[in-house]
Amino acid sequence: MYITLLQTPDRDGFQGQVALNISQINGFREVSFKDIGGNSEKDKAGYVGTYTEVLLSPSQVVLVADPISQILKKIRDAKVKEEQEQLTVAKCYSYPEA
């Protein structure tokens, strides 16, 4: 089962999508953007810009723009959808009671 997330923007501002297999996700870490001096970068309104590191097995890290709460919601929605599909398939193949 896969979820689709937005990658962090590159230097040109391009922000692609990435599909992740949720069975391989081990954890998340929210990190702030840093400048050359190691200070957190802020936007024009003064808010610190953040991105999320998604930790996958085996030993992979994917950088995405989505916050952890949104990623967890997408995982939950995907699991609910899969359970509903399994119930629908089970009903199609069940035998009528005698």
Image (spheres, grey):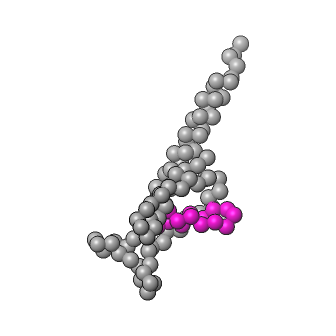
Residue at the far bottom: name it.
37
On screen, residue 80 above or below 47: above
Out of 38 and 89, give the one closest to the viewer. 38
On screen, residue 19 above or below 61: above
Q: Is residue 50 visible?
A: no
Q: Residue 40: horizontal and vertical position, in percent?
A: 41, 79
Q: Quadrant where the C terminus lies?
A: top right
Instruction: Say if the magenta span includes residue 24.
Output: no
Predominant SS of the magenta segment: strand
Residue in view at x 56 percent, y 64 percent:
62
Kindly indicate the quadrant of the structure image that contains residue 49.
bottom left
Residue in view at x 43 percent, y 62 percent:
14
The segment highlighted magenta reads 50-65
Q: Residue 64: horizontal and vertical position, in percent?
A: 50, 62
Residue in view at x 62 percent, y 58 percent:
25
Residue in view at x 57 percent, y 45 percent:
79
On screen, residue 49 above or below 21: below
Q: Residue 29: horizontal and vertical position, in percent?
A: 53, 68
Out of 46 and 9, give the one closest to the viewer. 9
Left or right of residue 57, residue 64 in this image: left
